[in-house]
Image (spheres, grey):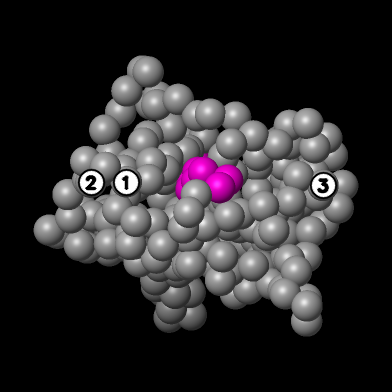
Amino acid sequence: MISRRARLLLAALMRIGAVLVGVPLLYLAAALAGSLIPANRGWHEARDGITIFVETNGVHTWIVMPAVTPVMDWRPLVPASDIRDPRYAGHYVAIGYGNREFYLNTPAWKDLTVRRALGAAFGIGPSLLHVDHEPDPRPSRDERPIVLTIDQYRRLSAYVAARFLRRPDGRTIALTGRGYGPSDVFYEARGGYNIFYTCNEWAGAALRTAGVRVGIWTPFSQGIMARFRASEG
């Protein structure tokens, strides 16, 4: 016969197990619903305007924008002199958002540790913006073009620019020499990162601010990319 203490312990373990299983399932269900329920339902892609790209590596999402347009010149914020080899400065900049510890110390998935994953998930530590200078991007399954109106692009670029932490003189703060290659660099960013405001939700929020039709909550890359046409280019 099982003692009362053993029954209580078993019941407690079952409740803990239910929470450990139920919380991730609830998160995934909410992520699916958030991605499927659209914000800006009436949005239609512009026929003429400024072409941006939404880029993914399957996990992380970037917003890829022209380096220079009449609306926004990114060069003062992310100058080519900040990257290891300024010759790699192209016509576009790809900007993403993430947890500082995760970005700097997890260049490959083999470098991922439980501590870093939990730290990112629960918002431990500051965030960074990752900027990669790119040549002319081409439409593909992982890089999807969107044509925005002038006003939409103005709102998008304002949202992204506001995330850069600035010095008193207005200059951005680059982590000189810290990047994955010769064309990218990290910048100090405003705000935190957690499981509710992920790199992909940051990108989704930027697109929603511009007025683009995208899910009301997009913690995963797939929830964003599914909204835009794929092309092999």
Tag 2 residue:
46
Quadrant of the rendered structure where residue 90 is?
top right
Residue type at mark 1 is Gly
Q: In the rendered structure, does residue 32 fall within the stretch colored magenta?
A: no
Rendered image: mark on residue 209: none
Tag 3 residue:
81
In which quadrant is the C terminus drawn? top left
Q: Secondary structure at mark 2?
A: loop
Q: Are the two marked residues, 1 and 2, in contact with CB atoms closer than 8 angstroms?
A: yes
Residue type at mark 2 is Ala
Point out the stretch of residues depicted in magenta: 59-68
Residue 71 seen in the figure: yes
Q: Position of residue 157 (x, y in %)?
A: 48, 60
Give the Cα distance between marks 3 and 1. Answer: 29 Å
Of the image marks 2 and 3, the number of the one nearer the N terminus:
2
Q: Position of residue 179 (x, y in %)?
A: 78, 44
Residue in the image at 35% along x and 66% along y: 209
